[in-house]
Amino acid sequence: DAKTTQPPSMDCAEGRAANLPCNHSTISGNEYVYWYRQIHSQGPQYIIHGLKNNETNEMASLIITEDRKSSTLILPHATLRDTAVYYCIVRVFQGAQKLVFGQGTRLTINP
Amino acid sequence: GAVVSQHPSRVICKSGTSVKIECRSLDFQATTMFWYRQFPKQSLMLMATSNEGSKATYEQGVEKDKFLINHASLTLSTLTVTSAHPEDSSFYICSGTGRNEQFFGPGTRLTVL
């Protein structure tokens, strides 16, 4: 079973920041928070991951609360191409560990 | 990120036939590959974990004799849907593991008539 909870859907205006929340209250000390997204009829795309510090890359920022029970993915300037289902996943930091997908958040960017 | 390809991208077959889907890691060696299935408007469901040179590990409820997985090299894993039926129609996605991330293929849309 997925160990994360996300809102089923969100809307955001183009050009605005999209903030996607994720609850992972049962996260273990050695588990990282990963974010992937899936654009319609494509394979999931890796976005970012983190353990406890905030992370930023060219795609997004990841803010993890101090108690690590929740996190927020931030797309700073959303575009129409960011419309996708976003998945928040927790797992240990090891490539061979499987990813268990929950239902994700369907983010719609509106013009 | 690393690149994973799948072939074919789309396949239509008759009920009772077998279909093979290839998954290749193009610029990295994947000792472990995963196979997922996704039905319309649903999330990805893990079917099996494939390790190079050994038998695949199947998730509960997935028939190993129906979904044959071969991982003969560090860059190629294949999924064969044997005796396909309309209920096997789905979007099949593979992923390969890099050092610490998983990279997904573009998926294969299987339609069984």
Image (spheres, coloured by chain):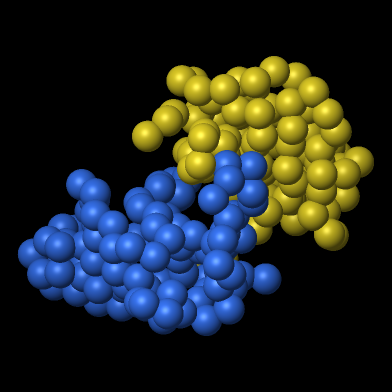
Q: What's the residue at 24%, 66% (across, down)?
A: A74
In the foreground, B77 or B106: B77
Q: In x, y percent, where is residue B85?
A: 80, 48
Q: Is residue A21 left or right of residue B109?
A: left
Q: Residue A69, how many percent across, how many down? A: 46, 79
For the N terminus of chain A, give its image quadrant. bottom right
Residue B93 in view: no
Say which of A66 and A57 sits in front: A66
Q: Residue at horizontal 60%, vertical 28%?
A: B30
Percent across and percent down for residue A60 are: 24, 56
Residue that sits furthest to the left in the current view: A15
| Placement of the C terminus of chain A among the 4 image quadrants | bottom left
Placement of A84 over or under B83, stated as above or below: below
B69 in relation to A1, above or below: above
The colour one sees for chain B in the rendered image is yellow
Chain identifier matching the blue colour in the rendered picture: A
Is residue B65 visible to us here?
Answer: yes
